[in-house]
Image: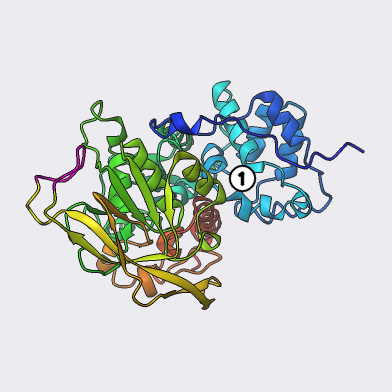
Amino acid sequence: MAKIIPTKTPMPEQDPAIRRRNSLEVPLGYTPEQAMQEARRCLQCKKPDCIPGCPVNIDIPGFLHLVAEGKFIEAAHLVKRANALPAVTGRVCPQEEQCEGRCVMAKKFESVGIGRLERFVADWEAAQGAVQIPPKAPPTGKRVAVVGSGPAGITVSAELALLGHDVKMFEALHEPGGVLVYGIPEFRLPKAIVAREIDYVCSLGVQLETDVVIGMTYTVDELLEEFDAIFLGTGAGLPWFLGIPGENLNGVYSANEYLTRANLMRAYDFPNYDTPPIRGNRVITVGGGNVAMDSARTALRLGAKQSIIVYRRSRAEMPARLEEIHHAEQEGVEFQLLTNPVAIHATTSAVSEGSAAPAAGTGNWVREIECIRMELGEPDASGRRRPVPVKNSNFRIPADVVVISIGQSPNPLIPQTTPELKVAKGGVITVDAETGKTSKRGVFAGGDVATGGATVILAMGAGKKAAVAIHAYLETGEW
């Protein structure tokens, strides 16, 4: 029996002192030798629990066995039978909560680095120019409109195209990719990777039209006059705010706007791109999720001298991936935990050099964020201990820029223009969890638009389920 290696093969990374001032990808990826070494840690369980832990049901032991033998192209092709975006999910999927969290190795040791190996085989396939177009079913003559080109929309489009349907994907922005291009920073998911995966989906025969806002350019009912079925994968792009005094001050942004300017509009590469970056010497990000980590780390790359996370619970309750928290700490992001904002204040004090603020004396630019100390009480509905304010513990933190990153919900435009479409609390579209069927015949939905803000891989899983249901509907006409 081969000797068990208890820990993962380390993945090379950029030095934190260097990467905090550039937008190049942080992890550098495995070499072929490192990938094979890591894949050999897989025990090849007879009843692998990692597969049901994957929302898209990749044959994980199968592809790891191929990697261990050095058959990288074959491994990539096996992964892509289940997952159209392995280079993306290998980078941003929370494997520690899904496949790796259920790895048998994790019971005593570190789990196998499934995500790292998924990324490796996808990148290897592209580098070798060995991308394979799977066989497609004969044309069915049926047409499907996919609204949104994020993870759910991309997945549904690829699956339906392979089943022989004529698929057209509509995107509201000028570039496809959804949250993959506007929300996730270059240093975590390079835009070239997203473009490569989109090109793959289009190579399957999927048509793409950008700058089309469904609900304005066309309504859902108008699309149904032309298409046999519709899938809504428009995500959750409507940011939440705290509802505290001062949120309307200049210098206060939603994480959605802050990251969209930096990512999709390339402000991180100013002046090569002419989108002015949002800069401040002292940037406060409110929140504890992955988006908050992205915002705080982006602030450093845009020139902040201090980037501070303000979060109302302790580190143990942070919803962000441990890897993202670790990377943020390495890069110098500071954490103000058990701290909750209660107001944002403007002052007329002098503007610090390099700040995004206008001339002093205007009185409408953020200068301080007032917070209160918190302590943890009993668990709430989320299972995490509820934060409780500590009386008379208010204090202030100087700030040039404040980024609010506490969550988001779907844009209401499509439900407002489609009366038969039922929505639930938070504006999410009501769907059948197994099929993605909505209350309107011929219309399906999935991903964040049906769940609220979640993960890339869960949106892809919803897309796969919806594709199966859409195919059955197109074949039988039964609703």
Q: Is residue 316 magenta?
A: no
Q: Position of residue 127 (x, y in %)?
A: 55, 22
Q: Please tell me whether the stretch drawn in magenta is mainly helix, strand or loop.
A: loop
User: What secondary structure is found at the residue carrying circle 1?
Assistant: loop
Q: Is residue 29 above or below residue 474?
A: above
Relative to residue 465, is residue 283 drawn left or right? left
Q: Position of residue 435 (x, y in %)?
A: 53, 64
Which of the two residues, 299 or 43, is positioned nearer the viewer here?
299
Residue occupied by mark 1: 82
Q: Is residue 355 magenta?
A: yes
Label 1 crowding class (10 Å Cα cut-off): few <14, some 14-19, many 20+?
A: some
* Residue at the image position 35 percent from the left and 53 percent from the top: 285
Q: Residue furthest right?
A: 1
Q: Position of residue 105 (x, y in %)?
A: 77, 49
Q: Is residue 183 above or below residue 21?
A: below
Count the numbered circles shown. 1
Give the residues drawn in magenta, as a range.
Answer: 350-359
- Quarter of the image containing the N terminus? top right
Q: Is residue 331 above or below residue 220?
A: above
Q: Is residue 81 above or below residue 127?
A: below
Which of the two residues, 209 or 338, is positioned nearer the viewer here?
338
* Residue at the image position 40 percent from the left and 59 percent from the top: 287
| Three-letter code, disc 1 | Ala
